[in-house]
Amino acid sequence: MEFVFLDAADKRLFVRSDAEQATWTTEELSLHILFPYQADKAVTRGMRIAFQYLGAWQVFEVRKVINYEPDHYQDITAEHIVISELSDEHCNEQDITDKTIAQTLPGILSGSLWGIGTNTAANVSSVSLSRGSVWQAVRQLEQNWNCYITPRIAMSATGITGRYLDVAPAVGVWRGVHLSVDKNAADMGVTIDDTELITAIYAYGGNDEDGNVITLEKASWARTTDHPAKPAGQMYLLDPDANAVYGRNGRPRYGFYQNTEIKDPQILLEKAWEALKKDSAPKITIDCVVSDLYRLGYADQPLRLHDTAMVEIRPTGNVYQLEIIQLQIDLLDPTVTRPTIGAYIPNIVYISKAIETETVSRG
């Protein structure tokens, strides 16, 4: 596989195809790569590494280089340039109300090197952005609009010609992939964890004009196919379906949601329901090595981040339709790529740049 090296100004330096290891962890936007040392093509911190994957270019900035002697190897750790470039840009606090991501994201990116690319998300949402970096704001938009925002680079023979953030609804694409340990998955480890499970949730927002904390007391909903009923006067939201299965002797398992930026009880109810949905069932996480990756339900494509797959767990015989939440892609040998499959868990990028005013806890 060819790796194109650029300088900090995005000018091409040289090309190398002698990597001995190359792993891209997609959800963390990180790259680990091992090259034999070459004096005329030595890798140094601050250089950029570009490669094509599934027809699109990705570019990573070298953050750390370990030179091994006497073996003469360079062990390289890099992160996607979207992180550093948008972390360097400042975003002021602002309230965004009832807009689509197409109406919101270009303004957030204004003045940076990045622009909005392809967009298939049409839902409307609102958010109160805190003062911070543009990268932090982009991640907050991703959560509030319930979408996936992924970087994509355009390259020419001389260097980078465009930087884009592609947007898609946060719904995994089903491509007919069925995994089972005895057919096409090996070293499968299955974790079923209910330590964070809740069936009801209290919620707290900011202060009203009288200085009182906003709660769910004044918010209400009638039951629909999308959410349970929430009567006015009740301080919490209960998921009766989840409680019937996972409640302790019929008693709810309570948690709470807090976001001090929210001033409207009805918006607080919507956010509380999103938080409750994420934690109202046990977390199932599956780690495995998938063999024959390029023939698993596809004609000519490998598994992709956010695809959904049918996974059969033996010996129980249970079958789950789950999302691929992380891929450790082996760029040199795709057949040993390791997907992590299960309920969505915020990645390390989200965690390290989390908004401190928003908290979800369990009782």
Image (spheres, grey):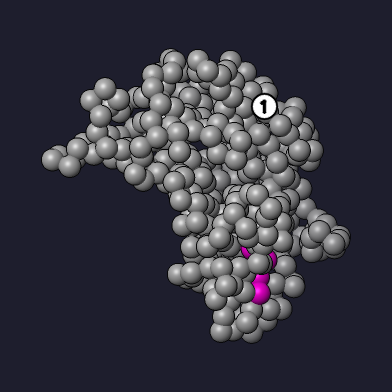
Residue 2: x and y in percent read 45, 33
Number of numbered discs on residues: 1
User: Which stretch did the figure color magenta?
Assistant: 319-323
- Asked whether the viewer can see residue 292, the reply is yes
Q: Is residue 360 or residue 149 the one in the foreground?
A: 149
Mark 1 residue element = strand
Q: Is residue 38 or residue 102 the one in the foreground?
A: 38
Which residue is depicted at the point 72% across and 44% down?
Answer: 169
Which quadrant holds residue 255? bottom right
Decide: is 119 above or below 90: below
Which residue is depicted at the point 36% across and 24% down?
Answer: 47
Residue 136: x and y in percent read 53, 34
Q: Main secondary structure of the magenta part?
A: strand
Decide: is 221 above or below 82: below
- Asked whether the viewer can see residue 282, the reply is no
Query: Is 19 on the left-hand or right-hand side of 284?
Result: left
Residue 267: x and y in percent read 73, 45
Amino acid type for the residue under numbered disc 1: Ile
Residue 62: x and y in percent read 36, 31
Q: Is residue 301 or residue 115 the one in the foreground?
A: 301
Which residue is depicted at the point 59% across and 20% down?
Answer: 162
| Magenta stretch encompasses residue 303 | no
Q: Is residue 339 or residue 216 the one in the foreground?
A: 339
Q: Categorize mark 1 by other alpha carbons within 10 Å: few (<14), some (14-19), many (20+).
A: many
The residue under label 1 is 116
Q: Quadrant of the N terminus?
A: top left
Query: Is 33 on the left-hand or right-hand side of 54?
Result: left
Decide: is 251 above or below 5: below
Which residue is depicted at the point 62% across and 27% down?
Answer: 164
| Magenta stretch encompasses residue 320 | yes
Residue, far left:
70
